[in-house]
Image (cartoon, helix red, strand yellow):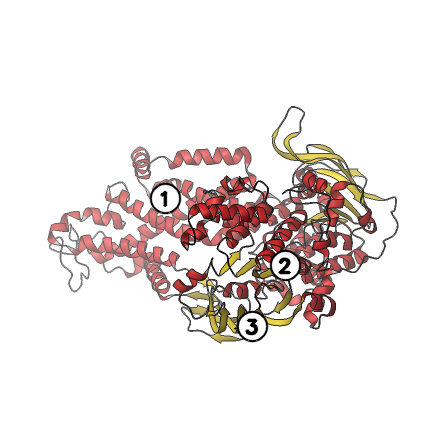
């Protein structure tokens, strides 16, 4: 077959093509992840120390992001905040996606009454407004990191379940599923080996999207004062405690907001620009 | 200009996902005289549809006409603007697609859609257009020509819809009509009516046609000349008689040879060993009624016997219950009544209740290898799974056996690392078959396994099946709508109609069928003889009783 190389629209690496937006987005995410892991070793001041004479201090040498409403170092608080925001959200999204996807695949493969019961129960869960549910749980059992993680995970299980079930139902009608069934395979093999590899890409995209929702919901809860309790603070809590600085255009309000925006937008851009496998028979 | 169509050195390129540019048509030239019907024939991927569409100046998304001239009725279609081309489409050139069912709008009546062309091109007032449409319906021998236009597309059969789409193409009085595999999706008994109708209308109107098909026998009935394409190049051109009797090019000979499968050597006479016996099996769909039988019975009280080392063919038109029968035997769709005895033991109706050994000894191979192979796994994993599951082989033994199996189905060993999407249709079907062989079965149920393949590839698969049978002593149940395929491989042929077993005969007695439906079915299979369709006489009573017109 005659072939000529056309101008490549994207770069390619290991049989995948990717574009610049995706690379930048993944660099931002990588940076925040590293900060979350190494925050205690790189913060210039302890997050509880009052280091400024003034509150809502401006950006200046030594206090690179200004100070907050008590005169604490904003840079340290944002860096430590990354730890809580990224960590809690990641744990919650991992739990919700894992349980949602496994339940969804089991429901699609098994069908019958199990499917009906699971679907109706999770639909009922879905009908409870997420913020209200969070409010009630935190009000009832108090706020702590494990409670927050579990609450956020439970809120997002029904969505992950619906998504995975819809994908798995499509795969389930394929002939290779019938072949595997008449071979006598178990449900665990069916979902793990036949279905999962076929839905993993959309599931990963959904994972990213759900992560963004959870970051925003966590920030929302913290903003309402139901998230992490002082002196710990995630980004949402940072926005809330410094909201008084808004009239003074204090960096203390803007910086955590930008942090939330940069993380969520990057995740969104990354999942929209995931590397594509090059499908080309003769390549 | 002497010819209606003159294509000179046509080149079309496509761009792949990776940005590579591939030539799909490499300098094709052809002529069509006024009123002449030429056939474009070739395997899938040979570029026959691409060439046909280029006559309308159309290239499918991702493709570009990059060179050559396409003169149709004195105008160069490649050079015209899209607007000027649109003016010619429907009036000078018309198109009949493969699947009429998918190209009609289900929300408006047939008449509205048939006369739409006259409205777009402002050819004639609607009243006159309707009259003209009814004339065409009559010419295409559609039932109830005056009333059929008022119906909606879902209210007529597939064969009728295909003729209605021809009426739609003909209403603008085109000089050239392009038929893109118009009968491929139809049953043989319906195909004949459609072919006859096309042929008489085209001849009466003196319209030139391009008939795209991969079926040489169908083409022989309708075309004046045949153009054989392969790999985007014209291999051979000649009149139908020339091509059929004295083909020069090796590819054309291969095509012809594939059409006449070598007759099967007689197997050992019927032994007393019954491998599979099913008695009065009934299965269907819908609510279960009081007598324990489903509302709609797709298989109605069917019995059959398969002997060891012999093959049974099941033949019938679409909807006759032959695929349901395969699923019932395999236990995918449990029977509502009846017994299945396999290798001397009574089988449970549902696959889930059968023992692992019983499941292993009976394997089923599906029609569409595309959906029967998991696209996310490499070939090696697909074939190795039954080895690990049934035979508990370790990694090394599995790898060795995968090599052997690939060798058995005549695939190179290097293919084991590929994914199904990187294989051709015939290769996929071989992998599909290798997976069934991996279980060491005694019986393989083949559900239309050659229907999605090209003639040449299909005949190679059939030869492979025969060879494997000789080596491994398998038995097949071979389900198909294609008589020539069944004849080539089966010792007994069972004819099904409407969920019931109509007759069972041996291949050498096909001409002496006793049941009227079998007679109709067997006489409807096109032969490689240009005069066959014109000479065909069918009992009108039979046709009205069993044909779906």
Q: Residues within 10 Å of mark 2 (few under 14, many from 20)?
A: many
In 3D space, how far apart are the residues under numbered discs 2 and 3 (Cα atoms)?
30 Å
Question: Residue B490 location, x and y as percent?
Answer: 78, 51
Question: Which is more foreground, mark 2 or mark 1?
Answer: 2
Decide which of B440, A176 is in the foreground and name it. Answer: A176
Judging from the image, what secondary structure is the residue with disc 3 in?
strand
For disc 1, the marked residue is: A149
Q: Earlier in the sequence, mark 2 or mark 3?
A: 3
Q: Is residue B290 above or below residue A149?
A: above
Could you classify mark 3 by the number of other residues whose Cα lies within 10 Å: few (under 14), some (14-19), or many (20 or more)?
some
Q: Chain of mark 1?
A: A
Residue that label 2 marks: B428
- Labels 1, 3: front one: 3
Name the one closer to the observer, B294 or A149.
B294
Tag on residue B28? 3
Give the distance between the C-alpha atoms of the residues marked 1 and 3, in whole angstroms: 66 Å
Residue A134, position in %: x, y?
32, 38
């Amino acid at each position: 077959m005659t072939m000529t190389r056309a101008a490549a629209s994207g770069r390619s690496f290991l049989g995948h093509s990717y574009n610049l937006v995706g690379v930048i987005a993944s660099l931002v995410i990588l940076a925040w992840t590293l900060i979350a892991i190494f925050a205690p070793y790189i913060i210039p001041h302890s997050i509880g120390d009052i280091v400024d004479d003034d509150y809502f201090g401006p950006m200046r040498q030594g206090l690179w992001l200004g100070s907050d409403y008590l005169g604490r170092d904003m840079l340290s608080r944002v860096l430590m905040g990354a730890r809580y925001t990224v960590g809690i959200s990641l744990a919650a999204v991992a739990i919700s996606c894992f349980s949602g996807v496994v339940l969804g695949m089991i429901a699609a493969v098994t069908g019958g009454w199990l499917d009906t019961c699971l679907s109706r129960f999770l639909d009922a869960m879905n009908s409870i407004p997420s913020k209200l549910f969070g409010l009630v749980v935190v009000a009832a059992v108090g706020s702590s990191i494990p409670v927050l993680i579990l609450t956020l995970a439970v809120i997002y299980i029904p969505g992950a379940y619906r998504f995975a079930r819809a994908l798995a139902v499509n795969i389930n009608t394929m002939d290779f599923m019938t072949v595997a069934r008449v071979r006598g395979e178990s449900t665990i093999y069916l979902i793990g080996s036949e279905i999962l590899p076929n839905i993993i890409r959309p599931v990963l995209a959904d994972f990213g999207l759900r992560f963004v929702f959870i970051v925003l919901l966590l920030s929302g809860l913290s903003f309402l004062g139901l998230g992490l309790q002082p002196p710990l603070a995630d980004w949402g809590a940072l926005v809330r405690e410094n909201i008084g600085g808004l009239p003074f255009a204090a960096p203390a309000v803007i910086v955590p907001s930008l942090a939330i925006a940069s993380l969520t937008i990057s995740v969104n851009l990354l999942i929209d620009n995931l590397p594509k496998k090059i499908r080309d028979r003769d390549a | 200009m002497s010819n209606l169509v003159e294509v000179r050195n046509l080149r079309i390129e496509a761009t792949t996902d990776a940005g590579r540019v591939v030539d799909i048509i490499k300098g094709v030239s052809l002529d069509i005289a006024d009123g002449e019907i030429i056939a474009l024939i070739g395997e899938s991927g040979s570029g026959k549809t691409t060439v046909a569409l280029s006559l309308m100046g159309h290239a499918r998304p991702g493709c570009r006409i990059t060179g050559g001239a396409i003169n149709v009725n004195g105008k160069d279609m490649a050079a015209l603007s899209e607007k000027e081309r649109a003016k010619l489409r429907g009036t000078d050139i018309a198109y009949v697609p493969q699947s009429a069912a998918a190209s009609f709008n289900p929300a408006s009546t047939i008449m509205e859609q048939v006369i739409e062309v006259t409205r777009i091109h402002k050819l004639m007032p609607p009243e006159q257009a309707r009259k003209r449409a009814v004339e065409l319906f009559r010419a295409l021998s559609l039932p109830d020509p005056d009333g059929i236009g008022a119906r909606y597309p879902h209210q007529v059969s597939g064969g009728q819809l295909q003729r209605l789409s021809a009426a739609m193409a003909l209403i603008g009085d085109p000089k050239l009509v392009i038929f893109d595999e118009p009968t491929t999706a139809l049953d043989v008994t319906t195909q004949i009516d459609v072919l006859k109708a096309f042929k008489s209308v085209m001849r009466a109107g003196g319209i030139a046609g391009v008939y795209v098909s991969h079926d040489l026998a169908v083409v022989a009935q309708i075309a004046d000349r045949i153009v054989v394409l392969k790999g985007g190049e014209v291999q051979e051109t000649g009149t139908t008689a020339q091509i059929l009797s004295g083909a020069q090019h090796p590819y054309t000979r291969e095509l012809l040879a594939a059409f006449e499968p070598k007759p099967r050597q007689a197997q050992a006479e019927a032994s007393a060993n019954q491998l599979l016996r099913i008695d009065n099996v009934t299965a269907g769909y819908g609510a279960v009624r009081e007598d324990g039988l489903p509302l709609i019975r797709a298989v109605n009280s069917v019995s059959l016997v398969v002997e060891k080392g012999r093959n049974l063919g099941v033949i019938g038109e679409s909807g006759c219950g032959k695929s349901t029968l395969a699923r019932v035997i395999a236990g995918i769709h449990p029977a509502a009544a009846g017994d299945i005895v396999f290798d001397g033991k009574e089988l449970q109706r549902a696959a889930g209740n059968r023992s692992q050994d019983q499941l292993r000894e009976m394997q089923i191979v599906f029609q569409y290898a595309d959906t029967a192979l998991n696209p996310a796994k490499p070939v090696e994993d697909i074939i190795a799974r039954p080895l690990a599951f049934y035979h508990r082989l370790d990694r090394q033994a599995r790898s060795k056996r995968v090599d052997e199996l690939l060798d058995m189905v005549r695939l190179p060993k290097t293919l084991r690392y590929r994914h199904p999407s990187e294989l051709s249709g015939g290769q996929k079907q071989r992998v599909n078959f290798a997976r069934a062989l991996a279980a060491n079965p005694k019986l393989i149920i083949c559900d239309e396994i050659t229907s999605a393949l090209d003639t040449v590839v299909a005949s190679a698969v059939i030869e492979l099946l025969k060879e494997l049978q000789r080596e491994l002593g398998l038995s097949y149940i071979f389900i198909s709508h294609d008589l020539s395929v069944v004849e080539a491989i089966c010792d007994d042929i069972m004819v099904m109609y409407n969920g019931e077993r109509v007759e069972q005969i041996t291949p050498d007695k096909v001409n002496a069928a006793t049941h009227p439906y079998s007679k109709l079915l067997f006489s409807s299979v096109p032969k490689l003889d240009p005069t066959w369709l014109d000479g065909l006489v069918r009992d009108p009573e039979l046709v009205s009783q069993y044909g779906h017109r």
